[in-house]
Image (spheres, rainbow, N blue to C red):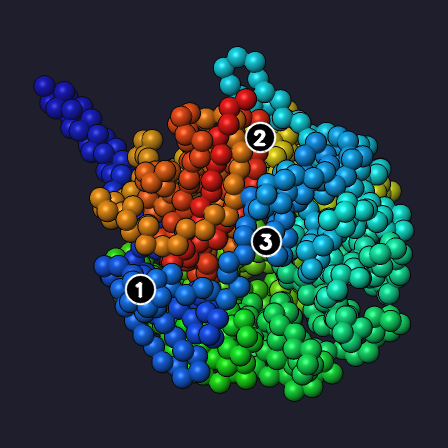
Amino acid sequence: MKKHILIASACISLFALGAHAQSDKKVLTTKDYDEATKALGFNASKLVYRYNVNPIWLPDGKFWYSVSVPGGVEFVLIDPATGARKTGPDKKSILPEADGGAAAGAGRRRGGGMESVSPDGKKAVFIKDWNLWVRDLETKKETQLTTDGVKDYGYATDNAGWTHSDRPILLWSPDSKKIATFQQDQRHVHDMYLVKTKVGAPELEQWKYPLPEDKKIIQIERVIIEVDNGKMIRLKMPSDDRRGTLSDDIASGSPYDDNEWNADASKLMFVSTSRDHKIEKVRIANALTGDVRDVFEEKVATQYESGQRTINNRFLDKTNEIIWYSERDDWGHLYLYDAATGKLKNQITKGNFVVTQLLKIDEANRLLYFMANGREPGRDPYFAHFYSVHFDGSNLKLLTPEDGNHNINLSPDGKYFTDNYSQPNVPPVSVLRDMKGKLITELERTDISKLLATGWKPAEPIKVKSNDGKWDLYGLMFKPKDFDPSKKYPIVNYVYPGPQGGGVGTRNFGPSRGDHQALADLGFIVVIIDGSCNPDRSKSFHDVCYGNMGDNTLNDQVAGIKQLAASRPYMDLDKVGIWGHSGGGFATADAMFTYPDFYKVGISESGNHDNRNYEDDWGERYIGLEAKGPNGKTNYEEQANQLNAGNLRGKLLLAHGGMDDNVPPYNTYLVVEALQKANKDFDLVVFPNARHGYGADALYMTRRRWDYFGKNLMGAEVPKEYKINTNTNTTPVKKDSVSVVSTRKNTVFSRLPVSVTNITLDIFDNGTIDGDSISVYYNSKLLVSNRGLTDKPLTVNLLLDEKAAQHEIVLFANNLGSIPPNTATIVVKAGDKRYELHSSASLTENAVLVLEYKPK
């Protein structure tokens, strides 16, 4: 009997010990996920008021704007001459005119997203069957301009491989009589193929997608067309490689990059870029004869760029001069050239700072106004400030003295500017200044009191040294809302290695940055470090990884995290994870293969794992042309992730969209195949019909990311199949919401003809992810309420009423994000047609897309 009691006691003790061990295991509950969701943009942004000023300038020099306030919207009218301020609950209360007064520059007609409208608003050029046509917007008469365009050898073709659409790439002359464009020869270039998953026979998507292995890439043959008579002037020069000075496209900074007309359209200045981006030839064409004159050229050892995300070259025809951007002294600066002789007249800006954007040229007073980073000592070198300087380089003046990142909006008359300035952890202040920098008045001070009341805390700016000790590196750290410094937290390293931009993104304040704070609130320390090899600093800093994208800034990431942990004992270096998307997906898999002792868990989304399988221009800009080394391998092959897949020791999740036309999914499949051959365990998520950003599947991926780090890095139990609800804590839609929308001006930004009733809209934030939120209405019916925009599409599915010929989709701005206005990229899919459009909305103006339905 005693024996049985002893055995029973032992069993009870073991059971109790097991139960105790089980209870010690971290458990993430549905409530934890609910709390994390509150930190996502579509929730956090609603708790911020008086957030930035987006001025609407009026013909009399005044301007008005609106800001969200508790309970509604406040409208404000400002007289810059006196600083006088008038406020009201609606536009009519501040502007007695029924229409609110015409905005300066308003009244111009807009065409559809697939056509280019002339400056006078009377004509629109579009592509039909590989040729260019012009439409009279009054009479609707269409006239064919070119006749010899054929498949893969057409005019104004928008195809860089990774981006492609039916819009024409061209530049109208100021007098609306000519266009500068090209005939594009892509007949010899590789095809890319994607297969749509569906019931029944699959659908094949096929288009031209150049690769680094192509001996000859896409060529453009430059032409000028006189629109009224259809006369074509071919420029007397060989074809150019399809290359631009700014990015891996020729229409990323303007309708047609690196082209500029003079005032009377007799001359066209343009730049020819070599395939490897090492040679830039500045040229001027005679628009009547097609004769081309070389003005000057610049050669670089690595790659030339005309600015930091914006082109800063200008043609000054009145004085026959050219302003040219160059990093020849290791910093991005402006230079003045004689356009007649091609001789350098003088360097305009100089010093250890970077000119980022040339905003205004006052030719009469020979004065430039520009944005620059890194000039003010003791400040974050990524903060942009506004300056003026004379053409001869004298009297450089700081116009925005506050410590922060400045965002400028110039008045059309050139007398004033508004400035929204902030820091990642300091909310914006909006002010009005004159062009000499004199403060006229403070306009707004952002109110985040309701956000703070939820327990929200801003990200912490961080600074570390690069792995080699040469550079100061900057970033952000996100801590849990209930942070306890006595605890140990696993670390998640978000990475985007560039080199065209870093992981931190904008230095503006934002209530939310992706899901970084949400992930932190689940119990992680999230770290973002902009490693060496990123832009907005010196040329030598940007070129650190030139030729070796396989570097991926990982040595800087590892060194930086170790430095942070040395003074922060709450960071657990035994539990470090990493994730990233696109280039960050490439870097994440690389990290798991090359730093297996440091990174224990990785999530690699849509990575360009082998740049031989990615479009030619990106790799050739930052790696150079493909060439074999002494070991028989090419410079591209040596950087391919699949070659190191056998080194995997941690937990790796790979994800990709099956219809990704930016980074084709075969990049990830190469890694999958290599892992299988190496007999490695890993996880894979495929979204069969998703593009690069996953569209409607984006929130599913976010939840899987939380689960994966929770289970494998934290060692926690996670809620089963949690669904992120975008309506969490959102204000219910009022019955009169349509009337609220109707108080704003509706501006049609595009009209598209469609022949099917099933329409899909993928809506992205356009450019920097800055917290924009929108609502979407279809024929006055609310479909989407207050959803945040990111680089991952918000997908809206429409079923058009066949009885109606016209259908309106209204994009309503719920806020302006940290970089006003509220801008979006909309990919419209209608049957086998795909259109890419760009919209802009404000707190006073809705962006409207009109679909004109006509069945086949």
Whether residue 763 is visible to the viewer of this picture, yes or no, is no
Q: CA distance from mark 1 to mark 3?
A: 28 Å
On screen, residue 616 versus residue 50, left or right, reads: right
Which residue is tagged 2?
833
Report the residue marked by disc 1: 92
Residue lying at 46% horizontally and 64% vertically, measured from the top left: 103
Q: Residue 183's x, y, as percent?
A: 78, 42
Where does the N terminus fall, quadrant-wise? Answer: top left
Q: Callout 1 environment at 10 Å: few (<14), some (14 to 19), or many (20+)?
A: some
Instruction: Please tell me whether mark 2 or mark 3 is closer to you in this view.
Output: 3
Q: In the rendered image, which quarter is residue 350 located in?
A: bottom right
Q: Amino acid at mark 3?
A: Gly
Up the image or down, 137 lies above or below 57; here it is above
Label 3 element class: loop
- What amino acid does circle 1 point to? Lys
Query: Mark 1 touching mark 3, by CB under 8 A?
Result: no
Q: Measured from the top left, where is residue 143 in percent x and y? A: 69, 39
Residue 259 at x, y percent in the picture: 74, 57
| Residue carrying label 3 | 121
Q: Nearer the viewer, residue 570 or 774?
A: 774
**Who's the residue at 72% across and 34% down the image?**
130
